[in-house]
Amino acid sequence: MWQSSVKREPLFNVPPVITILLGLFVIVHVGRTWLLTAAQNQYFLDLFAFIPARYDNTLLLGDILPGGWPAEVWTFFSYSLIHATWLHLGVNAIWFLPFGTAIARRFGPARFLAFFAVTAAAGAMLHLFTHAGDTGAVIGASAAISGTMAGAMRFAFQRGGPLSPRREIASNPYRVPALPLLFVLTDPRVLGFIIVWFGINFLFGAGFTSLSGGQPVAWQAHIGGFLAGLMLFSWFDPPDVAQDHGVAAAPH
């Protein structure tokens, strides 16, 4: 009987950094919804959610929101740790587990956390660009999770990758050479995934569905995180990523 020499990851072997972030999502949500009063919860959101009006000096709200200028910095990241409902958190967790795991196994914890932060900030930045002066609060990890989905597309469909039909050629499917950015749109599987992903988010934008307690979905933030994950992937990809299986890395 032929036996593959592929080194496969256990099905439920989630990297610790993913488990810690998911645990942090739950802790924040439990603390906000079960331990805080309505007034305290509103203050918490004013302090840590991403609110475009915070950056508009012509609005009174930008002056009365708590946190001062430091909050103008940390809310680009802190909003990604807060969720509107258990459903919102649960759906994000479902997507975060496979795609976050793929990126974390490739990058390692430090690079992964930096990637998560940058894609979260990119999502907030695009939302700010499209909603300048808006008083609505943006919360949720969806932008950063969208970044992990885009980043995974750079290698998951590659020969020997975790979504490749020929995984047996790679000793570690999460560390195969990445698809160069210039060739992303030439791979029909990657292109198909991107088209479906953008289609779903445009449905969100049209008000087709919402997972945020009846509030509109900040789909522009999703797109900002996705584009950042797709285009900035190479900044975080370890330079020796292909050495695990002796394949020369493709140019990024």
Image (cartoon, rainbow, N blue to C red):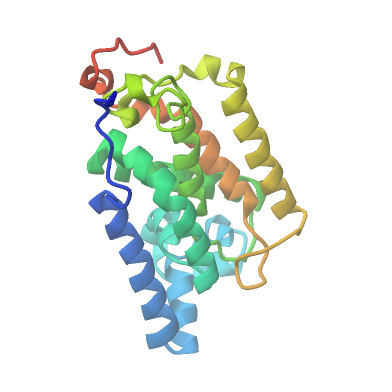
Q: In which quarter of the image is residue 169?
A: top left
Say if residue 141 shows up in the picture. Answer: no
- Tell me which corner region of the image, top left, top right, bottom left or bottom right, holds residue 172: top left
Q: Residue at x 49, y 58 (%)?
A: 92
Q: Position of residue 51 (x, y in %)?
A: 54, 62
Q: Which residue lies furthest to the bottom in this view?
A: 37
Question: What residue appears at the point 45 percent right and 82 percent down from the top-left corner?
Answer: 33
Q: Measured along the vertical axis of the image, is residue 98 above or below residue 211?
A: above
Q: Find residue 176 and report its horizontal and vertical position in percent.
A: 34, 22
Give whichever of 1, 5 is nearer the camera.
Answer: 1
Query: Could you tell me residue 54's position as x and y percent?
Result: 53, 61
Q: Nearer the viewer, residue 251 or 128?
A: 251
Is 162 placed left or right of 112 in the picture?
Answer: right
Tell me, yes or no, if residue 119 can be seen here: yes
At x 41% / y 16%, what residue is drawn?
Answer: 252
| In-image side of 162 versus 139 (left or right) | left
| Quadrant where the image shows the N terminus | top left
Q: Which of 91 and 115 is in front in this view?
A: 91
In the shown orientation, is residue 235 left or right of residue 51? left
Query: What residue sits 57% from the left and 49% below the top?
Result: 221
